[in-house]
Image (cartoon, rainbow, N blue to C red):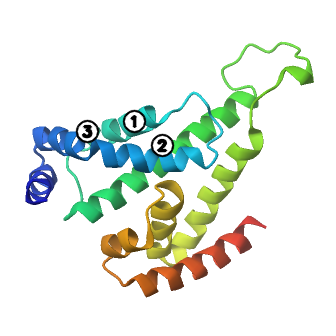
Amino acid sequence: MSDITGLIIRARDGDREAVDGLFQAMYPELRRIAHTRLRRGFPDPDVGTTALVNECYLKLRASNRLDADSRAHFFAYTASAMRSIIVDIARSKAAERHGGHAVHVTLDEGLWSGDAAGEALILKVHEALEQIGELDQRLVQLVEMRYFAGMTDPEIAEALDVTDRTVRRDWQKARLLLATALR
């Protein structure tokens, strides 16, 4: 565990080799988180666990420094990065469906096999989180960690430096705000 903390500290200070080492050390756990999220119905079958983790790595690698103090904060950061990646993919799929960058041809409706409802839901959740973020940014972090990264209440509590009870209470509040925003 101290090796991980050391890598996080070095990565936070801009050491790119530490970022590489951190991802290598945390790769199995990041794959578990990505697999959990994708298993819950991500609408693009071409995006797999490995692709999502690798995109997360590239996003982190492209930034100049890691903004995390501990293992839990690192996972909170990756949850946010995974959310961003998933939303970008859903937006791209929606744009494709509405004719973006495509040669227009007449298609038989029966040929369409895309899951527009799943992409639309991801985009609606993203928009709702932006609204909720204006009220309480911690609720947004909680939803990112739970919905986009599949983290457990104790993991979220550690990342946010709050109690499990606070996480459960905030989750109830976030669910209520999400339900209201998604109507």
Upstream in sequence: badge 3 or badge 2? 3
Using residue 151 as the reference point, say whether residue 161 is left or right of it: left
Q: Label 3, label 2: how many angstroms apart (C-alpha)?
A: 14 Å
Using residue 183 as the reference point, say whether residue 89 is left or right of it: left
Local crowd size for mark 1, using a 10 Å CA cut-off: few (<14), some (14–19), many (≥20):
some
Mark seen at residue 165: none
Residue under the point 58% across and 76% down: 174
Q: Does dot 2 land on a helix, a strand or a loop?
A: helix
Query: Which amino acid type is shown beneath numbered disc 3?
Result: Arg
Residue under the point 74% across and 37% down: 115
Looking at the rendered structure, the number of numbered marks drawn on it comes to 3
Residue under the point 28% across and 38% down: 62
Quadrant holding the N terminus: bottom left
Q: Could you say where residue 22 lies in the image, as x and y percent from the top left?
A: 19, 46
Residue under the point 37% across and 41% down: 56
Upstream in sequence: badge 1 or badge 2? 1
Upstream in sequence: badge 3 or badge 1? 1
Q: Does dot 3 land on a helix, a strand or a loop?
A: helix
Residue that numbered label 1 is attached to: 55
Residue that numbered label 3 is attached to: 61
Q: Label 1, label 2: how many angstroms apart (C-alpha)?
A: 7 Å
Residue that numbered label 2 is attached to: 85
Q: Could you say where residue 151 lies in the image, as x and y percent from the top left?
A: 43, 62
Query: Which amino acid type is shown beneath numbered disc 2?
Result: Ile
Using residue 116 as the reference point, say whether residue 129 is left or right of it: left
Q: Are marks 1 and 2 in contact (CB under 8 Å)?
A: yes
